[in-house]
Amino acid sequence: MLVGPPGTGKTMLAERLPGILPPLSESEALETCAVLSVSGQVTDLARWRRRPFRAPHHTASAVALVGGGSYPRPGEISLAHNGVLFLDELPEFSRHVLEVLREPMESGHIMISRAARQSTFPAQFQLVAAMNPCPCGYAGDPRCQCTPDQVQRYRSRISGPLLDRIDLCVQVPPVPLAELGTPRNDRDEDSATVRTRVLKARRQSLMRAGRPNAEISTRELERDCALGAPERRWFEGALERLGLSARAYHRVLRVARTIADLDSGAALLEREYLAEALQYRRL
Ligand SMILES: [Zn+2]
């Protein structure tokens, strides 16, 4: 979830995500291609191994998003299978549309039942969402005229259970004009550099569990996200203070595992990785 005022580059950041993700394996590419084919579209062979990126508008219907019709067709969540589903201005989507997303986010597929027939489509996507901090978009700035009540109502359009499934909330502040267009410095990284790090972390999770960290089971978590006794005590205390659910507990561990893989790859999860994973859960 990218949170920031309009014009700070949230959409641009989301569009860059497929560029740092690992290429599709051959079987993943075939699945993605098959979904496109079922929906009557053709695959661009030049982009065969590239992960799909779908960005439906907030006026999209539930059928357009999850699929449906009298002769069931895949929706955007299936067209984003093995890739990225980007929902810009998340609070503007209808509550109903957002609620139907929850089940496929958990299961990785969607079943569409019609009187005549029943179809199941794959829908394992990486959800990226963006929102303004308040209805006008300028919370924290003198320009903002929103009342606390309006801000509260705007944010509460995203239900707790949906928010619970969002692992990383990141602030995207405005870039000072003086920094735009200045020469690149040492801290700037291009997508290729970041991608190398992502591929290395991905390899580590595949070697360890045979699947990416996002997909490891709760039993595998005990094995792969081992905590020392002091770290466990600290982590449990932090979860309690933040009022996080049992689902959040497992999700934070998976994120911490990935942060560790991107960094040192250490087997034991140190406190700094847990702390970083925890701070991403705050909207
Ligand atoms: Zn405002």
Image: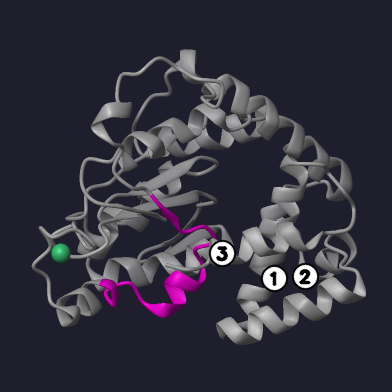
Label 3 crowd (10 A; few <14 / some 14-19 / many >=20):
some
> What amino acid is found at the position of numbered circle 3 in the picture?
Gln
> What amino acid is found at the position of numbered circle 2 in the picture?
Thr
Question: Where does label 3 land, which residue?
Answer: 279
The residues tagged by marks 3 and 1 sit, at their Cα atoms, a distance apart of 15 Å
* Residue 2 appears in view: yes
> What amino acid is found at the position of numbered circle 1 in the picture?
His
Question: Where does label 1 land, which residue?
Answer: 250
Camera-nearest label, 1 or 2:
1
- Residues at badges 3 and 1 in contact (C-beta under 8 Å)? no
The residues tagged by marks 1 and 2 sit, at their Cα atoms, a distance apart of 7 Å
Residue 55 vertical position relative to residue 159 in the rendered view, above or below = above
Q: Indicate whether residue 162 is drawn in magenta.
A: yes
**Quarter of the image with the N terminus in it:** bottom left
Camera-nearest label, 3 or 2:
3
Residue 279 vertical position relative to residue 265 in the rendered view, above or below = below
Rendered residue at 55%/27% (across/down):
187
Q: Indicate whether residue 226 is drawn in magenta.
A: no
> How far from the left and from the top, in percent, is residue 255?
66, 57
- Residues at badges 3 and 2 in contact (C-beta under 8 Å)? no
Rendered residue at 67%/64% (across/down):
275
> How far from the left and from the top, in percent, is residue 100?
37, 69
